[in-house]
Image: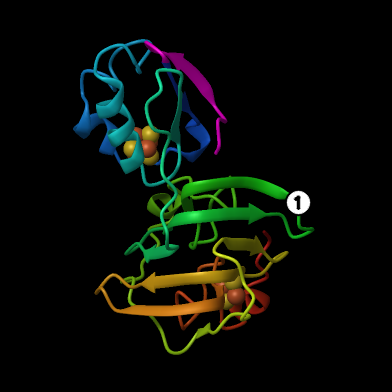
Amino acid sequence: MSTQGKAYEGDDITVYYDIKRCIHAAECVRGLPEVFDPDRRPWIDATQDENDALAEVIHRCPTGALHYTRTDGGAEEPTPDHNTIQVGPDGPLYVRGDVEVVTPEGSTIVEDTRIALCRCGASKHKPFCDNSHKNIEFAHDGRLGAGGVKEGADDAGPGLRIQPAENGPLLLQGPFTLTGADDETRDGGTAALCRCGASANKPFCDGSHRDVGFDG
Ligand code: SF4
Ligand code: FES
């Protein structure tokens, strides 16, 4: 589990906040405003509520900007049994599950249960979303294009491995369910998802990254 970012100590719980992965979805502020208060310094006060309530709200953070570790004997964050990818309209890919993101060379960048991945091509923190889709006014309704999902290997494990190809798509390997913004679902084991923003068959890669000279 990721413990990247700044640590905030509570009573037998430590909250970690990675600002580079926060896109201000505000699930935390809505869920526990007394703990997460952007107008206070420090903005996270982990002593303000029960640790179980705090953990439950942290699980809602869709980007993995928030994590925690506990020393009170309470449960750590469960790993979902199935990997899911939700296509955000005009926004990122929200991934949940047993997920590993690796570099094009294969080294681990992060292992996590919650991740938001750039699909507009403009993030300065690729492959993660940094909210740049708003600045460039990225527009896509989030519905699933044609095809795009294939079966995986029979001996594939339960985890989902995501590898950004150099100047190309996100390569997925492992069992997953991809869900479009209209709730259409497609199950698969491999896929190449567009991360340059130019595909005419989003969220799938159609080779347009070469035409637009995508640098990522
Ligand atoms: S829920 Fe996560 S992404 Fe949203 S504002 Fe809080 S820390 Fe940032
Ligand atoms: S990454 Fe966008 S078309 Fe291939």
> Which residue in the structure is indicated by mark 1?
107
Quadrant for the C terminus in the image? bottom right
In the image, which residues are magenta? 1-12
Residue situated in front as seen by the camera: 155 or 149: 155
- Say which quadrant the N terminus sits in: top right
Viewer-closest of 14 and 79: 79
**Front-lying residue, 10 or 157:** 157
Tell whether 135 sits left or right of 158.
left
Residue 4 location, quadrant = top right
State whether residue 24 appears in this view.
no
Question: Residue 153: x, y in percent?
Answer: 63, 80
Residue shown at 29%/23% (left/top)? Answer: 36
User: Is residue 166 shown above or below 16?
Assistant: below
Helix, strand or loop at mark 1: loop
User: Could you tell whether 11 is left or right of 215 in the image?
Assistant: left
Crowding at mark 1 (Cα within 10 Å: few <14, some 14-19, many 20+): few
Please identify the residue farthest to the right as the structure is shown: 105
Place of residue 113 in the rendered image (x, y in percent of width and height, measured from the top left): 47, 48
Please provide percent x and percent y for residue 204: 50, 78
Position in image of residue 133 (x %, y %): 42, 55
**Above or below: residue 170 compared with residue 124:** below
Task: Name the main secondary structure of what is drawn in magenta.
Answer: loop
- In the rendered structure, the answer to whether residue 11 lies left or right of residue 123 reads left
For residue 18: magenta? no
Give the residue displayed 52% in from the left and 21% down from the top.
Answer: 6
For this orientation, the residue located farthest to the bottom is: 147
Q: Picture quarter containing residue 71?
A: top left
